[in-house]
Structures are given as C-alpha cells and as structure tokens.
Amino acid sequence: MTEKTIVSSGLGHLFMTVFVFNFANFMVVPAITDVSMAALCPGEDECSLAIYLTGIQQAITGMGSLVMMPLIGNLSDHYGRKVMLTVPMMLATLPLVILAYSRERNFFYAYYALKTLVSMICEGSVLCLAHAYVADNVALGRRGSAFGILSGISSCSFVFGNLSTRFLPSAASVFQVSAAVSMVSVVYMRIFLPESSMEAAVIAVSSKEETVNECLLEKGCTNNRRPLRTTPSLHDSISLLRSSWTFSQAAIVAFFSSLGELGLYSALLYYLKAEFHFDKDQFADLMIISGMAGIISQMVLMPLLAKVMNEEKILAIGLIFNCVHIFLYSVAWVPWVIYFAATFQILAVFAGPSLRSIVSKQVGPTEQGKAQGCITGLCSFASIVSPLIFSPLTALFLSDNAPFVFPGFSLVCAAFFVMIAFIQSVLIRSPPPPVSDSKLDDSVSVEP
C-alpha cells in the first residue's frame, strides 16, 4: 500500500469518525431545550433559570477549555492525534447516558454537573485534533478545500442528527440512541483510524533530543536523557500569537466571531421558544435547513471558490453573511423569516474552515496541534465572556421587565460582534507560509 493510499484512507476514517461522533452529539441539540425547561420550569415558555444555567455552564466550560485546548493540541504534536482523541470521545458519552436513563429534575442536575465537567476537557477538542490531523496530511495549497470538506462532514452529521431527532418519538429515545452512537464512534476510531502522518514532527523532536543529549555529554553529565517539556505555558501561547501578525489577526477574528456565534446559540432557542413557541420538531426543522445549506456550501461551493479566491476573501464573505443571518433572526416577525434567515448559512459557514486554513499556514508541521489548540482556546475564552453578556440580555428582553420591546436585542448584539470580526478579516494580508510542504504536495490530494 502506497503512502498516498494510507493517507487517503486515514482522512476517510477521520471524516467518518467526526461524522459519527458529531451525529451522536447533534441529535440532542433540538431536544435539550425542551428537556431543560420541562425539568426546571414545567409548563412555561420562558425560563430565566434555564437561560442562566446554560450561561454558567458555557462560562465554566470555556474556562476549562481555555487551559485544556492548547495542552491537548500540544500533546498531540508529541504523542499523536489518535491517542489524544480517545479520552474526550469516551468522556463525551457519559452525560448522554444519564439523560438516556431519566429526564427528571434530579437526573437533569446530575447531567448538568457531569456535562459541565466533561465539556471542560472535551468541548472543541475533537474538532481541534481533526483540524491538526488534516493539516498533517494535506498540502498547503489544498488545505482550504480540505478544511471545508471537514466542516461539510460536520454539517452532514448535523443534518442527519436533527433528522433523527425529528422522527424519534420522544426525548428518551433521542438520548438513548445518542449514547449508543457515541459509544460506536469511539470503537470505530480506535479500530480503523490510523495514527496521523507526523514524520516531520517526529524528525524535529528527535533532532531536539539528540541536540540536548550532545550538550549534556559535552558538559560531562551522567544522565544523558532529559525529557523535553511538552506542557504549554501562557508564554508559549503568547509567543505563538506574536510569531506572525497574520496569526494575531486571525486570533482576533476567531475571538469576536466566536463571541457572536456563541451569543446566537445561547439565545436563539430560548428566543424562538418564547416568541414563536417552537418545540423539538420545529427546532430540528430549522437546524436541518441550516445544515443542508452548510453541506452545499462546504462540499460544493467552497472547494470551487478555493481555486479562484484566497482564504482571506472567503473568510470575509463568510463573516458578512453570518452577520446578516443573525440580524434577520433578531428582527423576525413571523416564523417563515426564521427559516429564510437559516438559508444564509450557505455562505456564512465559509468563515470557520477559511480561518483554520489561514492559521495552519502560519506555523510549521511540528506546531499544527499547538496552533489549532491556541485558536480553539481563544474561542473557549469567548465562551467565558459570552454568558456574561448574553445570558442577562436574553433573560431581560424575554421577560416582562424589558426596558423596551425588542425580544431579539441580544441577537443584534451578537451580530455586532461578528461585524467586528468581519472588519478585522478584511485587514488580513497573508504572508508566504513559513514552511514547505513539497512532500505532501507530491503525495496527497483531497477529493470532495
């Protein structure tokens, strides 16, 4: 079997792993709002307690992820992507099992506590490591398309997960199926996914070890092996941000776009529940429309645009349409406007893969995990800030005590933060990448 075949097979199994894992987790998204409100505020369409608990969970998760994502990314540079994927994928199954057993108030609180702890480690880690895996095995010129395909796979799992929820008869069956599929994803990954091709990283690490050993021998040290430090510090992250002005600009875009998107996700379902009385099935319908738009965009449009347009322009297009679609949600006066706004995802989803591609080109092959972990950590920092802004705003403007009548005001604020990210994105001027991936260019191709 040739190296090209091995790499292609590895990417195929990675895409399947991401699909199955995300399928399991996306299934519960339309159902969790109804489950939360039934447990905390039975019979009501507006529940400030549920909004605040969601915000607290998001903030705590963000604080954990801010520390864990750079650590997990850096450790994956040294010990492999597959090894580091195992733990978060296994832990992510545990909270699902609780609600698969019961959705009563006490079990909901147990789920809430465990989900918060697990998310501190798992939130974003699978996506972060998947991006690093792709960067290991795909040439610079093809990474934009490859990241787009990876996001398209996530959109596929989003659609199929929500379709499953739409036709499953109850919340109990949703969580039971989700828990079972999540376990399957771990087994599949362990059996079929080959370790990432990290030859350049291994060579670099070996060279560093040999240099350290030679220095120690010259100084007459008896211990000729000294373990290299693999745990990143705050100084490491700051140094990485300073390594390139383009990387710093991408980090600013990542923070503000994540802040806006997290504000959207934390407020939207409660807003729709209060204003339009949406339930599990209508949430699923909305998410299916968004997911289908994402599939068309990432699997068809983005690979075509990547051939004629650089990632910086694609990023700006994605952010401006993301801003527009959030604003349309905020001013919706009838349900059909909500569904129309969801179709703007066909261009809004360009932002994520384009940003990741820009970041991957600013570091060498031995730092892909660290770079992706740093960006994911900044997104996690946004999830700390987001609840402080959006939970009080959402609860206030959906209550009877709002200073003025504008239930979607928190969504307008989310659109404003995405607009800041857009303004920063148009200022990005990417320099030539610092490393050559000629070997990958010769050996790897990515087909949608």
Image (cartoon, rainbow, N blue to C red):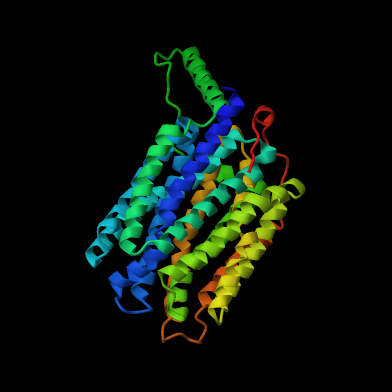
Relative to 448, does residue 438 appear above or below in the rendering? above
Quadrant including the C terminus? top right
- Determine the residue positioned at 52% across, 62% down: 288
Relative to 311, does residue 442 appear above or below in the rendering? above
Q: Which residue lies furthest to the right in this view?
A: 308
Q: Residue furthest left?
A: 106
* Relative to 34, 3 lies left or right: right
Q: Who is closer to the viewer here, 98 or 66?
A: 98
Quadrant including the N terminus? top right
Res. 263 in view: no
What is the x, y in percent for residue 317? Answer: 69, 59
Number of numbered callouts drawn: 0
Quadrant of the image occupied by residue 443: top right
Relative to 387, does residue 124 appear above or below in the rendering? above
Q: Who is closer to the viewer here, 73 or 161?
A: 161
Res. 348 in view: yes
What is the x, y in percent for residue 134? Answer: 57, 39
- Determine the residue positioned at 37% across, 41% down: 87
- Determine the residue positioned at 48% across, 45% down: 18
What is the x, y in percent for residue 310? Answer: 73, 49
- Determine the residue positioned at 71% across, 58% down: 426
What is the x, y in percent for residue 417? Answer: 58, 66
